[in-house]
Image: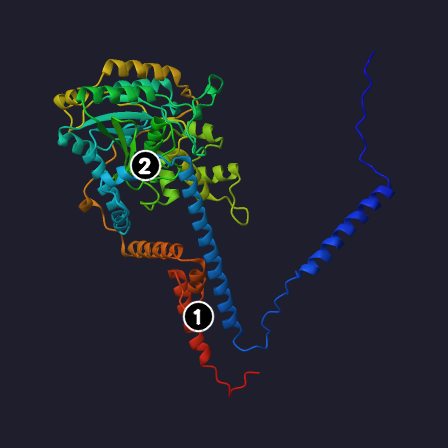
Amino acid sequence: MKRPKLKKASKRMTCHKRYKIKKKVREHHRKLRKEAKKRGHKKPRKDPGIPNSAPFKETLLREAELRKQQLEELKQQQKLDRQKEQDKKRKLETDPADEPSNVESVEEFGQSKPKKAKLSKQNPKTVHCLELKKVIEASDILLEVLDARDPLGCRCPQVEEVIVQSGHKKLVLVLNKSDLIPKENLENWLNYLTKELPTVVFKAFTNPKDKRKITKVKKKAVSFKHKVCFGKEGLLKLLGGFQETLGKPIQVGVIGFPNVGKSSIINSLKQERICNVGISMGLTRSMQVVPLDKQITIIDSPCFIVSPLNSSTALALRSPASIEVVKPLEAASAILSQADARQVVLKYNVPNYKNSLEFFTNLAQRRGLHQKGGSPNVERAAKLLWSEWTGASLCYYCQPPTLWTPPPHFNENIVADMKRGFNLEELEKNNAHNIQAIRGPSSGNSILFWSSGLTNGIIEEKDIPELPKVMQQGKQEEREDSEDKERLSDMSPIEETSEALPEESIAGEPSTRSSIILDEKTKEDDAYDFSTDYA
């Protein structure tokens, strides 16, 4: 027998029931109003404003607007301070045991708080150079992290030369982001790089949202690529074997250009988010000491400083936005010029283009990036492409050179010395296993990219080009603003409110400027002649 279809219950109700509900709601609201009246809560009176007939109305309105702006800034600052305090409390709650050890290790390497404050007043490039030198001096082994999509473009010959000249330090290459290139290309690059230095195939754990400890991935969850880490065991065995041959605890420095994944590798080895990671370039500004175990200590370092003499493509891909002021349209155009146009069209699903401007216009229309009036936002489209190429999501690859030519600072003796003390056979097995396990994209789904070769860096502070005067003034203003913010955060809320009012003293650079403008305008208004009738 066929089962009859059940009808859904109707939402209709009788008028009697509906009116009864409305009556109950009205009674409830009336009751609430009565209670509020008893407590003395009255509606705030509306501000009548300044009448048009009042003299100096514009001046008074400006003053009121300034006062309102200062109070809003103060509220924002207090909100930020509260968030910082909450973050500190959470960190202490999550890892109270690790906090003192980290502080002790930082102080051991001479990175105390007053020194940090002194360094922040210098040029950021100079700070990066000084911190990088500290890391190189303190380390026994240096891991140069390379982006597998462009390994040659991530190598800095100046830094490698400094390490080779030291004589007693080892250099190991780490091919990170190896899941973003085809397997055949990864094998070719591994064969090319192992002729010079020991090379480890790596795929770091990338999950910036999760701040807690990284849990072991179950077999069912292997399909989620962003939650899997490859190459960790091979790298730990390589470092552990070298430590045993050396017979003493070792310091391992992690160096490289921005956005290659230095901090992500440390977090993957430690199985905990200790180092700050993110999409933006140049997040690590100073050396950070992370004890891996009793015998191995890892030191995170700031990124290499890119020389301005490099090609525009290298500057766009390897310069942190916080240090190098690069226009997004120029940077994205330089990247686009080095990519295969046919594969770019297929990847971004846009029509064929004659120049970069036409491509960004098509991309903006495709992604719905519009300005006021409906015109395509070309600059925003350029920023989108730039962020994708420097991030860890886009699949593109470079072909290794056909002939292997060692750099000028390397020779056969140096190559043999760098490989001494490492178990290279076991490393080769681990690399082969990792290449099989990593699910890389096919060459059809990736974009072919022509590498611009080795990227020159700056090691000495004297080689850093001086900033223009306008830039230096801007930096100085930013520092003063940050100092004012720190001073505000140290004060109590009562002191802050008194500081924020313009009658006593105005805190912060922007508000002082506005007060100067206000004083000039009031001086003009003081020249008002009451004897003259303007009516």
Q: Where residue 396 is drawn, which disc sits there?
A: none
Which is nearer the N-term, disc 2 or disc 1?
2
In the image shown, does 345 or 76 lie closer to the viewer? 76
Inspect the image, locate mark 1, and give the three-letter code of the amino acid beneath it.
Answer: Glu
Quarter of the picture containing the N terminus is: top right
**Vertical side of 514 occupied by 453: above or below:** above
In the image shown, does 30 or 383 lie closer to the viewer? 30
| Residue bearing the label numbered 1 | 503
Inspect the image, locate mark 2, and give the three-letter code of the amino acid beneath it.
Answer: Pro
Left or right of residue 6: residue 486:
left
The answer to whether residue 189 shows anywhere in this view is no
**Residue at position x 12%, y 21% from top?**
413
Scheme by which the image is coloured:
rainbow
Does dot 1 land on a helix, a strand or a loop?
loop
Percent across and percent down for residue 77 are: 44, 54
**Vertical side of 39 occupied by 275: above or below:** above
**Residue at position x 79%, y 47% from top?**
24
Percent across and percent down for residue 63 are: 49, 68
**Residue at position x 38%, y 60% from top?**
508
In the image shown, does 89 or 373 lie closer to the viewer? 89
**Vertical side of 354 occupied by 30: above or below:** below
| Residue bearing the label numbered 2 | 258
Mark nearest the camera among 2 and 1 is 1
Quarter of the picture containing the C terminus is: bottom right
Residue 394 appears in which quarter of the rendering?
Answer: top left
Residue 451 appears in which quarter of the rendering?
Answer: top left
Structural distance between the alpha carbons of marks 2 and 1: 47 Å
In the image shown, does 414 or 347 lie closer to the viewer? 414
